[in-house]
Amino acid sequence: MFTSIAGRAVVVTGATRGIGKGIARVFADNGARVLIVGRDKDAAASAVAELTSGGADVSYLLADISVRRRIHSSVEVMHDSAASPCAPWLMQQIDAAIAAQGVAPQRLPSGAGHDTMAMGKLCPAGMLFVRCKDGLSHNPLESITVEDCAIGLKALTQFVRDFRAS
């Protein structure tokens, strides 16, 4: 298992906006060479300009097969909710608990609004993720190792023991 994304090449689909762009930013900020794949040329160019402003190595590839296949699409928005960010002071404490386990904390953009949307209205929220095999989450193939589960449990326990209200 590698411990750094620096210097690695990553492909992020749907990275012209939203969560995809947030994921591309995390990779770019950590030294990866990022290829954004999307359908909207202007959005892709804008995302690349934004992500490369700090010197990151980011480029894009258009991947819209609808014209070639003469497919017309339409989208009906069924649900649209604002992001529910985690409380920075809670995330700092979670990071400290993770680091205490000898693991470098990593911040990941998450679409886990279902976890923070409801609680975020009641109180500040923070989230601790446990590494999943091949990065698959909310998928039938999702799995974790006993060792990663133990690290997550130790980090959560450390967080609870050291918790300080803001």
Image (cartoon, rainbow, N blue to C red):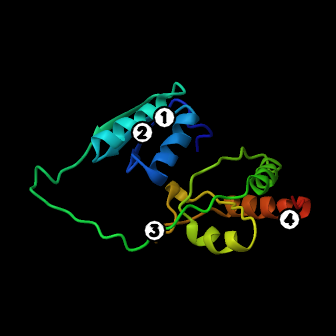
Q: Residue at x 67, y 64 (%)?
A: 146
Point out the frontmost of discs 1 and 4: 1
Query: Disc 1 vs disc 2: Cβ atoms closer than 8 Å?
Result: yes
Residue 80 - label: 3
Figure check: 31 above or below 2: above
Rate crowding at label 1 as few (under 14), some (14 to 19) or many (20 or more) other CA atoms within 10 Å.
many
User: Badge 2: how crowded within 10 Å, few (<14), some, or many (20+)?
Assistant: many
Quarter containing the N terminus? top right
Q: Tell me the residue at 61%/57% (across/down).
A: 131
Query: Which residue matches tag 4?
Result: 160
Report the residue marked by disc 2. 47
- Judge depth for marks 2 and 3 and give the one in front: 3
Q: Which quarter of the figure has residue 132? A: bottom right
Mark 1 element type: helix
Is 109 placed left or right of 160 in the picture? left
Indicate which disc, 3 or 4, sits on the residue closer to the N terminus. Answer: 3
Q: Is residue 122 left or right of residue 63?
A: right
- Give the amino acid at mark 4: Val
User: How far apart are the alpha carbons under marks 1 and 2?
Assistant: 6 Å
Foreground: disc 4 or disc 2:
2
Which circle's residue, 3 or 1, is located before the other in the chain? Answer: 1
Element class at badge 2: helix
Residue indicated by mark 1:
51
For the image, the number of numbered tags is 4
